[in-house]
Amino acid sequence: MELVTERLRLRMWRDEDLEALVALDSDPEVMRFIRDGSTRDRAQVTASFALLRQNWADRGYGLFATELVGSGELVGWVGITVPNFLPEILPAVEIGWRLGRAHWGHGYATEAARAVMAFGFDEVRLDRIVSICHPDNHASRHVMTKLGMAFDRRTTVPAHGGAVDVTAITRQEYAAARGDAGQRRTASTRGGGTSRRPAAATRPPADRC
Ligand SMILES: CC(C)(COP(=O)(O)OP(=O)(O)OC[C@H]1O[C@@H](n2cnc3c(N)ncnc32)[C@H](O)[C@@H]1OP(=O)(O)O)[C@@H](O)C(=O)NCCC(=O)NCCS
């Protein structure tokens, strides 16, 4: 499975991506609005790296390794997953993003997320996609707005007691916003293309808000 946009390639994970993920999650600025704001060590990242690959195998969707088309440099990840850390909104599928600081401010999160949202609605056949962020994470919240996601609720994450804002978009809202019946692609899709229902949330949460 691979999605290609104008500037980005969203692909499956390789063993060598682990080092970039360790660097990503050890940056306090990147992790500032994630969970309780703490960074993560190599052992923690290694565990969630295995889990995120397993999630792809179990569900047929997940977080995409996201790299620059030209250089192949990994900028971070964008994808969809089950927000098990927030039981009150389940069942749900969440779109999320985490990029290295050097790559912020270029529109990459929005560009990649548009492709992932199309994948979620067109290929996975989701009926609704949510997104969740810390109330002060204005960049992330702005990406949600650009994607057409509307405020759903402010609530608290049970595991750490922190506040989060939930936004959402339905299949109908998504189709109306792009002016068709939900058929048009916003990125080329390789190696997939079959319609499937999302599998049930059978695994513990990955490293999310
Ligand atoms: C959130 C994140 C993915 C955004 O990535 P990005 O590629 O810079 O995002 P984009 O450029 O596509 O869009 C960001 C938008 O927010 C705006 N923005 C950035 N910082 C902002 C701020 N402090 N206040 C308001 N808007 C802000 C940008 O101007 C841009 O809007 P524009 O296109 O209208 O100018 C990136 O900052 C990141 O990885 N942060 C750390 C991890 C994280 O917090 N992930 C989300 C957890 S919920």
Image (spheres, rainbow, N blue to C red):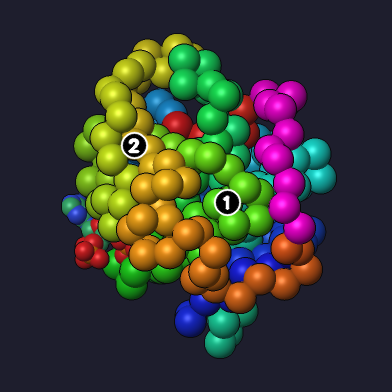
Q: Quadrant of the C terminus?
A: top left
Name the residue at 54% across, 30% down: 92
Q: Is 188 inside the magenta-drawn segment?
A: no
Question: Residue 80, relative to residue 8: is it above or below?
Answer: above
Q: The residue tagged with tag 2: helix, strand or loop?
A: strand
- Using the image as rendered, state which of residue 170 and residue 46 is in the foreground: 170
* Relative side of 88 to 138, left or right: right
Residues under numbered marks 1 and 2 in contact, where contact means CB atoms less than 8 Å apart? no
* Relative side of 186 to 168, left or right: right
Question: Residue 37, relative to residue 79: is it above or below?
Answer: above
Name the residue at 35% across, 31% down: 166
User: What span is in magenta?
Assistant: 194-204
Counting labels gives 2
Q: The residue tagged with tag 1: helix, strand or loop?
A: helix
Which residue ends up furthest to the bottom in the rendered image?
70
* CB at disc 2 and ligand 1 closer than 8 Å: no
Name the residue at 57% across, 24% down: 91
Q: Amino acid at mark 2?
A: Thr
Q: Which mark is residue 120?
A: 1
* Relative side of 24 to 35, left or right: right
Ligand 1 lies in which image quarter?
A: bottom left
Q: Quadrant of the N terminus?
A: bottom right
Q: Amino acid at mark 1?
A: Gly
